[in-house]
Amino acid sequence: MKILLNTLLIAGLLGAASTAMANTVAGHAKWNGNTGNMQDLCKFNGIPTAGVMSFDEATKTWKTTSAAVVILQTRGNNNLKVEPVKFLYQGTTQVTAITVDYKATGATSTVTMPTGAGAVNVNTDTIDASMNNVDGEVTFNIAGTAKHTTDVMLSENEDYHVKHKITCIQ
């Protein structure tokens, strides 16, 4: 969060007792402030947007057709990490274990970082972003595939989802 300091300009007009002469005095005043030591911050900037995935029954693989989008505001954090909760869910019920690939062909995750931040590594099972002590906004576009590790029959025309955990590390 940036603190904006407003400057208050004051111009004064002083009238002299004499009608023949007027004096003008111009100047300014300002408010100074310091945020002091602030706590580290890692919070969502808005509501995350859910991605969309489609299922290939022959390969037991889900593939994103639209990435999930998560925007974070971060201060004082050196690293951010995205990793899957390694289950397919229907509502709150774990349906089957899955293996996630964030680098899958045609469905690769991306990260947008503030200027001066460090490296981004999109791995098969994690997304790592190094902040290099740079504060700002980070956008994760989380895409990829999720493959069932067990042979489970899914219900027809039912909704399923894959969860991702985001961790801010000092």
Image: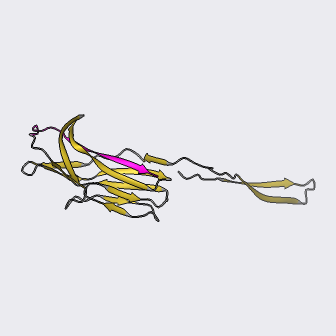
Q: Quadrant of residue 152?
A: top left
Residue sitting nearer the eye, 15 or 59: 59
Q: Residue at x 65, y 52 (%)?
A: 34
Residue positioned most to the right: 18
Q: Position of residue 140 (x, y in %)?
A: 34, 54
Q: Position of residue 92 (x, y in %)?
A: 24, 34
Residue sitting nearer the eye, 157 or 146: 146
Residue positioned most to the top: 92
Q: Residue at x 36, y 53 (%)?
A: 81
Magenta span: 153-170
Q: Residue at x 33, y 51 (%)?
A: 82
Q: Quadrant of residue 14?
A: bottom right
Q: Position of residue 44 (x, y in %)?
A: 41, 46
Q: Taking 48 as reference, is 140 above or below it? A: below
Colour scheme: secondary structure
Q: Quadrant of residue 103?
A: bottom left
Check residue 163 for magenta coloring: yes
- Tell me, yes or no, if residue 10 can be seen here: yes
* Left or right of residue 18, residue 39 in this image: left
* Left or right of residue 136, residue 51 in this image: left
